[in-house]
Image (spheres, rainbow, N blue to C red):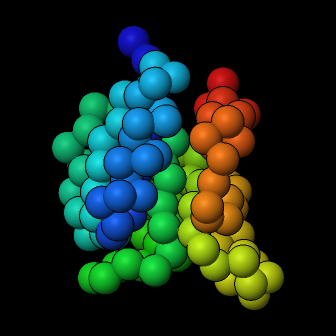
């Protein structure tokens, strides 16, 4: 069975782009439109191998989502990539201290996204 990725972004267009890229490479993709629905999706999914999240979303932002994921023992080691327009170093530091595995700045290159996902989820 292929690896499963949870893609979290409030922009349907961005979720579609991420999903299209990953599905084309054989990944299964579960989508969520904010941190609250992402946590529900994590509870419902049998196994998620990588989580890709935006930072700026309604209801629950990506940094808060990362903290909540890291607080769950079953997801403490799951790679979490932040995919966002935010490139400020203080935001990156905040993401890292919350437990993010990596940071990708939008717009992203599909090849680069696949390369990073493969690296954190061999």
Q: Pick out the residue farthest to the top.
A: 1
Quadrant occupied by the C terminus: top right
Residue 6, position as x, y percentages in the image: 39, 46
Quadrant occupied by the N terminus: top left
Q: How many marks?
A: 0
User: Vertical placement of 19 versus 11: above or below?
Assistant: above
Residue 47, position as x, y percentages in the image: 36, 33
Residue in the picture at 46% in, 19% down: 26
Q: Pick out the residue farthest to the right.
A: 89
Name which quarter of the figure residue 2 lies in: top left
**Left-right relation of 82 to 17:** right
Residue in the picture at 59% in, 47% down: 79
Looking at this view, is 101 or 82 the one in front?
82
Residue in the picture at 38% in, 78% down: 57
Name which quarter of the figure residue 83 lies in: bottom right
User: Vertical placement of 95 versus 37: above or below?
Assistant: below
Residue in the picture at 49% in, 36% down: 21
Residue 52, position as x, y percentages in the image: 50, 53
Can residue 59 be seen? yes
Name which quarter of the figure residue 99 lies in: bottom right
Residue 58, position as x, y percentages in the image: 31, 82
**Left-right relation of 56 to 100:** left
């Amino acid at each position: 069975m292929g690896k499963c990725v949870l893609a979290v972004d409030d922009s349907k267009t961005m979720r579609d782009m991420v999903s299209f890229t990953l599905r084309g490479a054989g990944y299964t993709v579960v989508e969520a439109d904010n941190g609250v629905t992402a946590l529900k999706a994590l509870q419902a999914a049998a196994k998620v191998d990588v989580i890709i999240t935006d930072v700026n979303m309604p209801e629950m932002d990506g940094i808060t989502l990362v903290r909540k994921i890291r607080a769950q023992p079953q997801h403490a080691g799951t790679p979490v990539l932040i995919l966002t327009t935010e490139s400020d170093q203080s935001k990156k530091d905040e993401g890292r201290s919350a437990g993010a595995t990596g940071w990708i700045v939008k717009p992203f290159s599909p090849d680069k996204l696949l390369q990073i996902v493969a690296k954190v989820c061999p």
